[in-house]
Amino acid sequence: MAWLLSLVLAVALQALLPMSASAQQAAEPGRVALVIANGSYPEAGIPGALTDGRAVASALRDGGFDVVAVEDADRAALLRALATFTGKLRRGAEAIVFYSGHAVQQRGRNFLVPLPPQNAEQDTIDLDALIDALILARPVSSFVFIDASRNNPWQPAGKGLLAVEPLERIAVMFSAAPGRTVTDSGARASQTVEEWLKAIRTPNLDMGAAAKRTQDAVARLTRRAQLPWLSSDPPAGLVVTRPVAVAQNNRAVIPPLEGTSAPPDAYELAFWETIRNSESAAEYKAYLDAYPNGRFAALARAREQLYRGKPPAPAASAAVAPPAPPPAAAAPAAPVAAGPQRDCTGCPELAAIPAGTFQMGSNDLYEFEKPVHPVTVKAFLLGTREVSYEEWDLCVDQGGCNHRPDDRGLGRGKRPVTDIHWNDANAYLSWLSARTGKRYRLPTESEWEYAARAGTATTYAWGQTMVKERANCNGCNDQPRRSAIAVGQFPPNSFGLYDMAGNAAEWVADCWSESYRSTPRDGSAYTVPACRERVLRGGSFNNDPRYLRSAARFKYDADVRFYTNGFRVAREP
């Protein structure tokens, strides 16, 4: 190990030479990250490694990390990235290292495989070189995520990775236990990375809690066939998405880290702020479902009883599911206007969706899409396009929305707004309802699929197989776009709806269910008390065609933003 330490020190000194003395004095401990994504191996490509690396780099930048990122790097590029990262490290800093690619174990250690791998014995990079850089710099906390527990042709003996010894202030996570491997498939290579991204994007979630949440999610999704491994508990206090101050007694208060015994968190306070002037019993009941012993529970119960049976005020809650439609014995819904319409300047265009009955779900691929079952949907209106940056920014400018997502340099305008979580979408709908006097909401999952199918029973709205230039996804076209594009660029379905497949994944009102066995058959939303996971439909530019099927569904944490996720509006007739 001594020769490695010398090499790391020498490389770090070379990286520091161009820095002036004043610049060195000005450098303060901060947040530094190294992200390496190697996927284009000729012999054993990893389809989603680059996508994962970019998503991780984006999440870390959003969290204030100075990110050194490299993709499909050869050995020299890896060493340069390591030197740059090492040069940025300061004592007392917070550091995160992420690697997605191939690795091998040999001579009792783990080695990262660069591109192109010619000789696994000579061209690889010792994982200890990364860890030694952290040991030497002595950051206050470090987390190393190695997503490389894969079978590959360069593994001479032994599967997976070797365990890393516990180290003070440094935790190492593998996607699978030492000696175990995982199988990658689809555009997103690693289920573990996806769950970890959800966790670290959760505001105020400590890395220890994020790692535990990742382990629990992957174990559940794989029926405990896979369990991410940790060398030791992550250092306390390392948070990627930092807490947001909330107003409390006329002063700014930073909520405590999630998982600690503490007063109501920022989400309960934010939830209450959105409904405290409401006259909707359903909204107070939704608060009680989420926070039965919350700070405002007694007042919420009193108001829920007071307003029970009364029609809701025009402004909808920013964080509750839409109320269930009236029972079957009620009068039929009023007919909706024919043709697209808008309720105001800058409002989304709406299409009238007629009432009807359809077969929801699919028995072809996944258990959570089963069983196929009949659902009756009442007439409603649905946005012809996904909500755009242009429409979202108007809400921000007028004070109805408080989150202005970054367009990542791709432009705003008619592109669908993304990096939106479920509560953000409901805040927009609340503002739109107040502005128009109409009842806007998210579509229910069954309404969404009914509208996406538009009278068809085939895999896609246009037929049984993928047809080129019908949607924006990874594999839908000869030239992939690799990002969301302006809404309405592909042909609409028979209901006049654009981008129901691909472009941005779309939030719907429902809580996640593992099957359709107990979900409503009347077109209403499936809800359970305090559900954390909500449903996304339609797939995105980042997904392959199987995730764009009319029956395809996904889940995501309601309070976590992701750069593929957006929404479209629904409205009562």
Image (cartoon, rainbow, N blue to C red):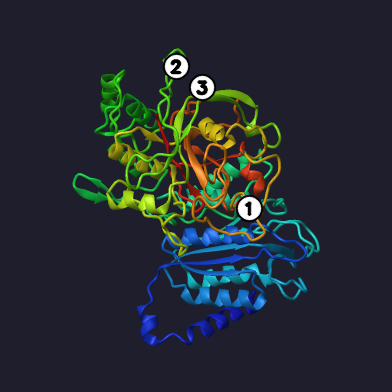
In the image, 44 versus 135, the foreground residue is: 44
The three-letter amino acid code for the residue at tag 1 is Glu
Callout 1: 10 Å neighbours few (<14), some, many (20+)? some
Residue 458 can be seen in this image: yes
Question: What element does badge 1 sit on?
Answer: loop
Measured as percent of width and height from the top left, residue 531 is found at: 46, 34
Q: CA distance from mark 2 to mark 3?
A: 9 Å
Q: Position of residue 420 (x, y in %)?
A: 44, 48
State the image coordinates of residue 31 (x, y, percent, origin top left).
Answer: 43, 66
Q: Which residue is mark 1?
A: 469
Is residue 481 depicted above or below 122 in this figure? above
Q: Residue furthest front?
A: 338
Quarter of the picture containing the N terminus is bottom right
**Which percent across, then down, holds residue 9?**
55, 80
Per the rendering, the mark at residue 522 is: 3
| Residue 263 in sight in this render | no
Say whether residue 516 is left or right of residue 525.
right
Q: Earlier in the sequence, mark 2 or mark 1?
A: 2
Q: Nearer the viewer, residue 36 or 400?
A: 400
Contact? badges 3 and 1 (CB < 8 Å): no
Q: Which residue is mark 2?
A: 327
Q: Is residue 273 above or below residue 308?
A: below
What amino acid type is highlighted by mark number 2? Pro
